[in-house]
Image (tube, grey):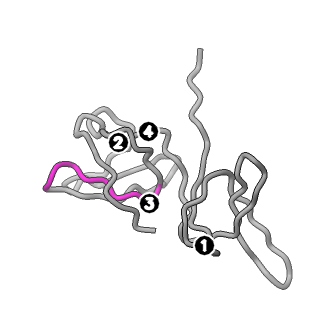
Amino acid sequence: MEQVREIEFRAKAIHDNKWVYGFPMHYKRPMYEKWTIREPSGLEHDVEESTLGQYTGLTDSKGKRIYEGDVLAFGSDCKSTVTYENGCFYVKYKKRVLCVGCKFVTALLPVVISNTL
């Protein structure tokens, strides 16, 4: 059976600057434009577009979900931000660009240490 990755986004809510999780909605009207996150319950939060990031479907070595924009630490000598480009999540590791889900990256036991967004 084919494995299906969970699709989820997160962004910081404008009203309290806390992370909210769900599905992004983009509203564009002649007089305004805004982004929201709709939680599974249906509740919508206005969010800062610059903080919007997608869940990669992976967790770090401590079980924390990895999102686009997270900063991963690979030991004490290397840190890299998760980016999305050409249909894949990437990190830079010692001058190499690697897919987040590749066996080499997961073998390095990454840890989410912060979020750049």
**Rendered residue at 34%/58% (across/down):** 71
Which of pointers 3 and 4 lies earlier in the amino acid sequence?
4
Q: CA distance from mark 1 to mark 3?
A: 14 Å
Query: Mark 3–mark 4 contact, CB under 8 Å?
Result: no
The quadrant where residue 31 appears: bottom right
Amino acid residing under circle 1: Glu
Residue bearing mark 2:
60
Who is closer to the viewer here, 23 or 17?
17
Outermost residue to the bottom: 31
Secondary structure beneath label 2? loop
Name the mark nearer the viewer: 2 or 3: 2
Asked if residue 6 lies left or right of residue 23, the reply is: left
Secondary structure beneath label 1? loop
Q: Sort mark 1 into few (<14), some (14-19) or many (20+) by Cα contacts within 10 Å.
A: some
Q: Magenta stretch containing residue 72, yes or no?
A: yes
Outermost residue to the right: 30
- Magenta part of the chain: 68-76
**Picture coordinates of residue 90 (x, y %)?**
39, 50
Q: Magenta stretch containing residue 86, yes or no?
A: no
Query: Mark 4–mark 2 contact, CB under 8 Å?
Result: yes
- Res 48 label: 1
Asked if residue 6 lies left or right of residue 29, the reply is: left
Query: Mark 1–mark 2 contact, CB under 8 Å?
Result: no
Which of pointers 1 and 3 lies earlier in the amino acid sequence?
1
Amino acid residing under circle 3: Gly
Which of pointers 4 and 1 lies earlier in the amino acid sequence?
1
- Res 58 label: 4
Amino acid residing under circle 4: Leu
Q: CA distance from mark 4 to mark 2?
A: 7 Å
The quadrant where residue 52 appears: bottom right
